[in-house]
Image (tube, rainbow, N blue to C red):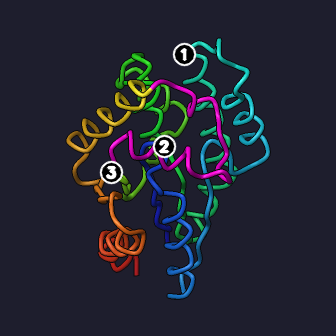
Amino acid sequence: MSGLFITFEGGDGAGKTTVLNQISDWLKESGYSVLKTREPGGIHIAESIREIILNKEHTTMDGRTEALLYAAARRQHLVEKVMPALNEGQVVLCDRFIDSSLAYQGYARGLGIDEVYQINQFAIEGCMPDVTLFFDIPPEEGLKRISANDEREKNRLDLEAVDFHERVYEAYQLLLRKYPERIQSINAHQDIEDVEEAAKEVLRPFLLKGK
């Protein structure tokens, strides 16, 4: 039996990581074998690449370099961690995946969504998520949450101007229209309990299919 690949997407401060952790606990309590991971990262090599990408001192990094580093981290993470778990029938919950590259580098950096998609197809060889949850919140609200959270990791992308984050948000709206069967929108501008319940409602049919 193959597993279920679920990815969590959204702008910075959307709350997707918090909900991912809650969904992980819910699935484990329901008897599922769950792998929780993140991008870029999840394994030693990819975490090392993450440190390079998100280092606040690397402000001169070229957009194409950034896109290629994300794709390289994604490839290693996929073959070393995600695919083995899926082959074992696990439910994989991944904090960001290919859609982040399409939104941040493809659209917000102006490299082209199709161009970045091609780079990533070389990396993932067609291994796409079964379902993607997009946590929809206005960029200004997400950035306010980041500023108010002293415990959150502040990285290079957090330092981008507001218009960059607005372009990221626009990109996700485009992706929602491009992949309506895969990407499901969750209203993240509500109480976290309601966001969690909305995520569960989206996931239940996919979980039933896998049984």
- Of mark 2 and mark 1, the one earlier in the sequence is 2
Q: Position of residue 131 (x, y in %)?
A: 37, 58
| Farthest-out residue, bottom | 30
Residue that carries the numbered disc 1 in the rendered image: 64
Is label 1 or label 3 in front?
3
Query: From the viewer's perspective, is 119 left or right of 203?
Result: right
Do the CB atoms of the residues marked 1 and 3 lie less than 8 Å apart?
no
Compared to residue 4, the image places residue 108 above or below, namely above
Asked if 168 appears above or below 204 in the picture, the reply is: above
Callout 1: 10 Å neighbours few (<14), some, many (20+)? some
Residue at x 72%, y 29% (from the top left corner): 55
Q: In the image, residue 133 lies at what x, y percent?
A: 37, 57
Q: Quadrant of residue 49?
A: top right
In three-dimensional space, the C-alpha distance between marks 2 and 1, rounded to whole angstroms, equals: 21 Å
Secondary structure under the numbered disc 3 in the rendered image: strand
- Mark drawn on residue 136: 3
* C-alpha distance separating marks 1 and 3: 27 Å
Q: Secondary structure at mark 2?
A: loop
Tag nearer the camera, 2 or 1: 2
Magenta part of the chain: 137-161
Q: Residue 38: where, in percent of width, then height?
A: 61, 52
Q: Residue at x 36, y 52 (%)?
A: 134
| Image disc number at residue 12 | 2
Foreground residue, 18 or 29?
A: 18
Q: What residue type is disc 2 on?
A: Asp
Q: Residue 104's spot in the image, x, y percent? A: 45, 30
User: In what quadrant of the picture does the C terminus appear?
Assistant: bottom left
| Amino acid type at mark 1 | Arg
